[in-house]
Amino acid sequence: MTDSIGKICILGGGTWGTALAKIVLMNQKHLNWFIRRDDQIEGFYKLGHNPNYLTNVKFNLAQITFYSNFEKAIKESDTIIIAIPSPFVKQYFRRIWNSTFRDKFMVSALKGIIPNDNMVMSEFLASNFKIPAENIGVISGPCHAEEVALERLSFLTVASKDESKARLLAEGITSRLLKARVSNDVVGIELAAVLKNIYAIAAGICQGLLYGDNFQAVLMSNCAGEMARFLNGVLPIERKITEQHYLGDMLVTGYSQFSRNRTLGAMIGKGYSVKTAQLEMEMIAEGYYGAKCIYELNSRFKIDMPIAQTVYQILYEKLAPQAAINRLIDYF
């Protein structure tokens, strides 16, 4: 299996990148790992774990080759798993030549959409680097990094237009800790990952406003319907919204204590300004950027999305959360 998927590289040394590294090394003997800061790499060698994120996850450093050179990490690997926050993607990729990606399997593990471009990662790679669809994949699903660190059973989906590549990678990361399945709905799964962050902010806002579980259940039900409406309007293919990479991921992000987006929403619901909440969190909540991107993207499709629009208005138009939710209730 290792020969089939080749050398795996993780791009990104944050929480999600660290969880993915643990996932890969549960079933693979070696990992290439790009981490931007040399002092963070030095911290790994001193401590045996990421000095900044998921510090309880210990690594056998003999299994890891670290890189602080982005292009070199890609060139010396075969399967590239991209775990960089979406707002920083362009600054990493802007100096990379198209030839760097020749014959690489580029797999997005982004949980967001690239701001201003309003593109998911697969579209960004295809548009800017002419990477063929069969060499692009995505990893997504109900899989919080913190639960990977706690070794709680988690689930991911690997998607690609080349399902054989998706299956090889899924089999290559399946272990006692993680179960993986495959799909061919690459862009649909990426857009679902963007939407679920927006809906988690909505759930958090309602939590902060002291709405109870009854209301949250109705909210999440309507979010699922809105997600299905958007995905089917933008990419009309046969899909089951109840699958783990759509509904499952949305539910865990909307309900979990580990959800950054729910946390951001809860702070806003309690009266924090958006800026203050972001500063206090010290971590990126992808839904903040996703709300604006989806709002702008939907100006073209004009799909009925009252929940996503409400979150956008709270975050960017300073609409009062209580008034916004009161108005939203009329849609339910």
Image (cartoon, rainbow, N blue to C red):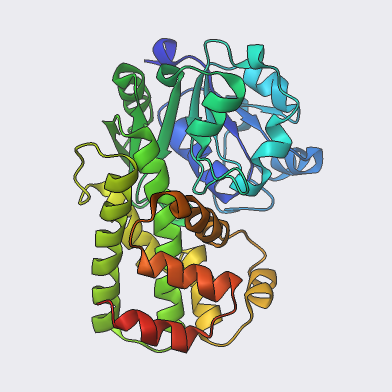
Q: Is residue 259 visible?
A: yes
- Quarter assignment of residue 27: top left
Q: Residue at x 26, y 53 (%)?
A: 228
- Quarter assignment of residue 317: bottom right
Up the image or down, 176 lies above or below 212; here it is above
Q: Give the position of the N terminus as an image quadrant.
A: top left
Q: Is residue 154 visible?
A: no
Q: Could you say which is closer to the camera, residue 181 or residue 90?
A: 90
Q: Residue at x 36, y 63 (%)?
A: 305
Up the image or down, 154 lies above or below 259; here it is above
Up the image or down, 306 lies above or below 102; here it is below
In the picture as drawn, the residue positioned furthest to the right comes out as 39
Q: Residue at x 41, y 46 (%)?
A: 191
Query: Horizontal placement of 21 versus 163: left or right?
Result: right
Up the image or down, 252 lies above or below 220; here it is above
Q: Could you say which is closer to the camera, residue 155 or residue 141?
A: 141
Q: Residue at x 36, y 42 (%)?
A: 189
Residue 76 screen position, x and y as percent? 63, 15
Numbered marks: total: 0
Query: Horizontal placement of 171 versus 37: left or right?
Result: left
Residue 30 screen position, x and y as percent? 53, 23
Residue 250 screen position, x and y as percent? 34, 58
Residue 307 screen position, x and y as percent? 38, 69
Q: Give the position of the C terminus as an image quadrant.
A: bottom left
